[in-house]
Image: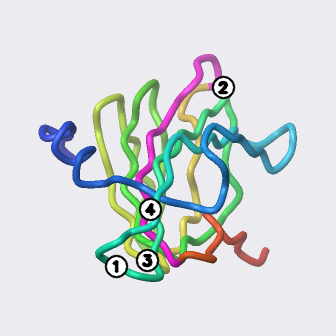
Amino acid sequence: MKPLNHFPSLLCWLAFAGLISVGSAQAHDAEQEKVTVLEQHPMLNAPGKKAMVLTVDYLPGQASIAHSHSGSAIAYVLEGEVISRVNDGKAITYKTGQTWYEPAGSKHYESRNASATKPAKLLVFILLDDKADILTPLPK
């Protein structure tokens, strides 16, 4: 994937919403990544939808659980390197400044810090239904 060249215009385009309060954080458990909601807003031009901006912090060697998103997401690597595998695609390592897109309903089988010694951080933009959770764990 190419680095995101129009990040400021994308950020303006994606004024985001959600059901978790701004600045809150959640972690699945001590071994999971830290998710912090930075911004959230109802989409006035798309009733019934919300948009969110959040960060995902990975400690060295940390990984997300396999999951899906009911909405569409764009991830931007702020720091480090992240390995991601979506649907039937192969695992791809994304470096600082690179992005990827996940269509609504995608299965995200792998999302993890590529380094065992350095942290990694994502900025994620997601558009989903008003009452939808950020992610849904996949059955094991």
Residue labelled with disc 1: 46
Per the rendering, the mark at residue 104 is 3
In the rendered image of this protein, does residue 1 appear above or below residue 134? above
Q: Amino acid at mark 2?
A: Pro
Tell me which segment is drawn in magenta.
116-129
Q: Quadrant of residue 90?
A: bottom left
Horizontal and vertical percent position of residue 115: 57, 27
> How far is the residue under mark 4 from the one under mark 1?
10 Å
Secondary structure, mark 1, is: loop
Q: Closer to the observer: label 3 or label 1?
A: 1
Q: Amino acid at mark 1?
A: Ala
In the rendered image of this protein, does residue 58 appear above or below residue 17? above
Secondary structure, mark 3, is: loop
Residue labelled with disc 2: 60
Q: Amino acid at mark 4?
A: Ala
> How far is the residue under mark 2 from the one under mark 3?
28 Å
Residue 21 belongs to the span the image colors magenta: no
Horizontal and vertical percent position of residue 55: 53, 39
Horizontal and vertical percent position of residue 53: 46, 48
